[in-house]
Amino acid sequence: MDKRIEIHRNEPFGLTRVYSRASPNHIRAFDGTSTLSNATSVTKSPEANHLEKCPDDPPELVGPLRIVFDEEQSMEQLVELNTYVEFGGHYKPPDCIPLQRIAIIIPFRNREHHLRHWLYYLHPILRRQQGEYGIYVIEQAGENTFNRAKLLNVGFVEASKENNYDCFIFSDVDIVPENDRNLYRCSQNPRHLACAMDKFGYKLPYTGYFGGVVAFTKEQYLKINGFSNNYWGWGTEDDDTYKRVTLSGMSVDRPDRNVGRTKMIRHQRDKGNEVNEKNYVVYNRMKYTRNQDGYISLKYSLIKIEKNQLFTKITVDIGKPPS
Ligand code: UDP
Ligand code: BGC
Ligand code: MN
């Protein structure tokens, strides 16, 4: 049975129609055993049960992880494996009050295989990290040149409509942490989580590298006016983001090199995302344009919101590069 629901742009947000919604399986313990005796503590709000704040250092973390991308699970298997995830890709720790409400934003087009690997590894990790989280896959509709950073802005706006998130993690679909102590959380400064990627020999390729996976609080994101909307095609948009951070008087936090180890699924450059030499021109002018180009100037049309069990997919038309 197809468990997805779709909300089209002409429909009201508050859905009154009831679709074949999968029942939330959040009353299962991590090892799969039933904790029905706790059922009331799950249905009431944490405050009502005098729950304590979740610890800074989540107790179920295991440290280094073995990440391999050879075998791939079907979406049905993934749903079976992650029964604690609530419909739409949401999770809230049942036994403590989470420290942050985290939206995970993934720019996306035509990478279904990568998304399955990502979901397979990330849901269990995120659960052990004890944040409240929601997964948002932001899909660029059509065949126009890809624009990663603009999709990330869309993710910020759309996720914020759903919940009062305090932290936004912007992650490529093909990157998985190799250590669950790399907390997918926000910190004092914008945080670079993919600071030791396998493809760069587990170190930064250059000091200002800020690609792959980054975390911003709502305030940090607004302080830099979000990301530029003007980088079409591959390259430089993450360098622009780094500049926005430093020009706004912030620095970048990073985990230690061992904790920050991440693996990227190897792939060819996608069609529609070729290197764009014009991006250097945009970058060279960013000092003057950054206050006008970003969150405040974002324009797009919402095409579809599709709720799946393990993630929410939001499809948008973001236009095309200027000719
Ligand atoms: N991406 C996508 N479809 C595309 C191009 C890019 O979904 O056609 C997304 C995806 O999340 C990907 C990210 O944009 O991980 C960055 O692109 P890419 O992986 O090509 O960059 P690189 O591997 O060079 O970091
Ligand atoms: C590009 C970045 C990219 C980095 C690593 C730089 O030249 O401008 O966008 O993330 O290389 O591949
Ligand atoms: Mn990649």
Image: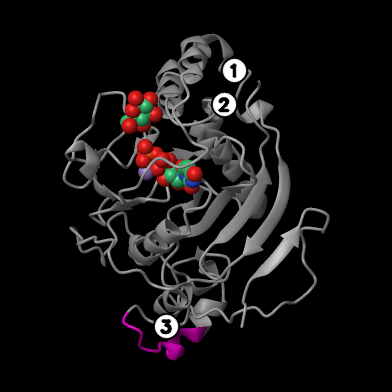
Number of numbered discs present? 3
Q: CA distance from mark 1 to mark 3?
A: 47 Å
> Which residue sits at x=26%, y=48%?
262
Residue behind mark 2: 225
Label 1: how many Cα within 10 Å (few below 14, some 14–19, many 20+): some
Q: Earlier in the sequence, mark 1 or mark 2?
A: 2
Q: Is residue 32 above or below residue 6?
A: below
Q: Secondary structure at mark 2?
A: loop
Which corner quadrant of the image does residue 225 belong to? Answer: top right
Q: Secondary structure at mark 1?
A: loop
Q: Which is nearer the eye, 259 or 308?
A: 308
Residue behind mark 1: 291
* Position in image of residue 8 (x %, y %): 76, 58
Residue behind mark 3: 28
Q: Is residue 275 above or below residue 36?
A: above
Q: Earlier in the sequence, mark 1 or mark 3?
A: 3
Point out which mark residue 304 bears. Answer: none
Residue 186 seen by the camera: no
The quadrant of the image that shows the N terminus is bottom right
Report whether the residue tagged 3 is closer than 8 Å to ligand 1: no
Q: Are marks 2 and 3 in contact (CB under 8 Å)?
A: no
**Which stretch did the figure color magenta?**
31-39
The amino acid type of the residue labelled 3 equals Arg
